[in-house]
Amino acid sequence: MTTVPKAENAEAHIAHLRSQITENTECGSNHYNLAVALMGQKEYDAAEEALHDAVDCSPTLAEAYVLLGGICLQRGDVEGCLRYNRYAVKARAGFAEGYANIGFILLQLVDGKNEKDDQEKIDTAIKNLRKAVVHNAKFVQAFTTLGNAYYMKGLLEEGIKANLEAVRIQPEFPIAHNNLCVGYLEKKEYAKAIEHCDIAISLGYEVPQGLQDELAPHRK
């Protein structure tokens, strides 16, 4: 798939893609690449139309469903984003990004209004995030989100393990270090919590002040 071009070349690139589509209207990749370029220009309505053309031509083009979900999320339509990512994993078996997105979105839908409903969302999120890391064992963001889901489930050890896997894959991933700080603080393993807090800060992550304040009495 193509990447978003620089601004000075964007219009020419879009014109070229439209020309390619005119010559071959049945190529889903051309429609998808046009959508990516249009999204780079923040032309979301036109991008959405191109993505629908893409999946009409290529129903297994899972990336197009993910981008449609992204447009929904940009509009504040979380349910629409969830729906399109579910289409993505149906379109292509083993599509890790789709499973990870489903897990992430479900966790955002946990609102504390109905405990049973919230637990079902967390359980389903964990199921999808596990699939994501099975299909992509180096998916750092998915491991981190899985760690959060475990924390929300009250599974502290599992959450720490998932975030440790994230930093094993990418040692300079600050969100995972912040999450490890949270987990170790909960376990009262203060030295480890401080270590990961300091790493996160050194990597430019804004560790919440409340978390830093809790650790302060335990610093030597």
Image (cartoon, grey):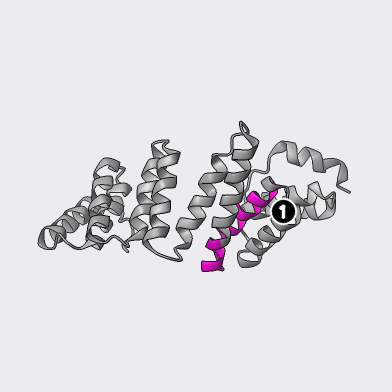
Name the residue furthest top. Answer: 113
Evaluate whether residue 141 shows in this view.
Answer: no
Q: Is residue 11 left or right of residue 110?
A: left
Q: Position of residue 23 (x, y in %)?
A: 10, 62
**In terms of image quadrants, where is residue 112?**
top right
Depth order, front residue of 219/42: 42
Secondary structure category for the residue under label 1: helix
Queried whether the magenta region covers residue 132, the answer comes back as: yes
The range drawn in magenta is 131-151
Q: Main secondary structure of the magenta part?
A: helix
Name the residue furthest left. Answer: 23
Callout 1, which amino acid? Leu
Q: Position of residue 2 (x, y in %)?
A: 31, 62
Name the residue furthest front. Answer: 116
**In terms of image quadrants, where is residue 130?**
bottom right
Residue pictured at 19% horizontal, 58% vertical:
17
Depth order, front residue of 26/189: 26
Evaluate whether residue 88 shows in this view.
Answer: yes
Depth order, front residue of 110/185: 110
Image quadrant holding the N terminus, namely bottom left
Q: Is residue 173 left or right of residue 215?
A: left
Residue pictured at 15% horizontal, 61% vertical:
20
Q: Is residue 118 left or right of residue 81?
A: right
Q: Residues within 10 Å of mark 1 (few under 14, many from 20)?
A: many
Q: Position of residue 47 (x, y in %)?
A: 27, 47
Q: Position of residue 46 (x, y in %)?
A: 24, 44
Queried whether the magenta region covers residue 185, the answer comes back as: no
Residue at mark 1: 180
Is residue 19 shown above or below 178?
A: below
Q: How many marks on residues?
A: 1
Residue pictured at 22% horizontal, 53% vertical:
53
